[in-house]
Amino acid sequence: MTNPDIVARWRAKTVRVPGSDCLWWTGAISGRGHGRFWYAPGRVVIAHRFAWALAYGVESLVGIELLGHRCDNPLCQRIGPDHVVASSYVENRREWAIRKQITGSPLDDPRGYDGGRGNCAIWRGVTRCSWRRSWTACVRSTASS
């Protein structure tokens, strides 16, 4: 964390976006949507954990179960009470469940509800349902969408 070249490489992969309070990650992204940062050959860390270590020191991560995104943006690198915070799995899931119910929340699925079968999306005229996990015909016709 004291190597200025590594810190500069991390900073070069973050940007501010007009209209957003988040500090956005532009580097590699994991399958779960979080930033990944290679700070040494063969050594990768979740990017917002690196940001936390920059702000509070590596030792501060020892007792932290996980870091939660109160802004609901997994690419956010901004450390602070409305963005990336120290949390636990239980607390993070509780907060997520509450925010998911808020209309207009980024956690709310804009594709809508299809009667309990899972959310569906239409791409190039083909409907994909999350419960089916493939781009195939769906119980919900594309004509009704």
Image (cartoon, rainbow, N blue to C red):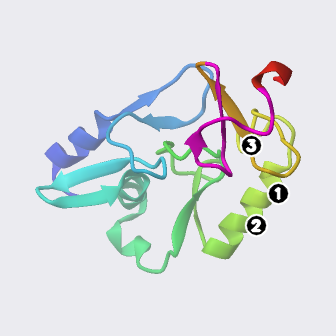
Q: Is residue 142 left or right of residue 13?
A: right
Question: Which residues lie in the magenta part?
Answer: 125-141
- In the picture of the structure, the residue carrying the numbered disc 1 is 98
Q: Earlier in the sequence, mark 3 or mark 1?
A: 1
Q: Residues within 10 Å of mark 3 (few under 14, many from 20)?
A: some
Query: What percent of the width, then of the height, locates residue 38?
Result: 22, 52
Q: Are marks 3 and 1 in contact (CB under 8 Å)?
A: no
Residue occupying image coordinates x 49% and y 42%: 75
| Displayed quadrant of residue 97 | bottom right
In terms of image quadrants, where is residue 111? Answer: top right
- Residue 120 lies in the magenta-colored region: no
Q: In this rendering, is residue 57 above or below 39?
A: below
Q: What is the distance, in whole Å, between disc 3 and disc 2 at their CAs? A: 22 Å
Q: Quadrant of the C terminus?
A: top right
Please say if the residues under marks 1 and 2 sit with CB atoms less than 8 Å apart: yes
Q: Circle 2 sits in a helix, a strand or a loop, which is it?
A: helix
Q: Is residue 105 left or right of residue 47?
A: right
- In depth, the one of 14 and 123 nearer the eye is 123
Residue that carries the numbered disc 2 in the rendered image: 94
Please, what is the three-letter code of the amino acid marked with disc 1? Answer: Ile
Q: Which mark is residue 119?
A: 3
SS of the residue under disc 1: helix
In the displayed orientation, state which residue is furthest to the bottom.
63
At x 48%, y 47%, the residue is 33
Q: Is residue 124 above or below residue 23?
A: above
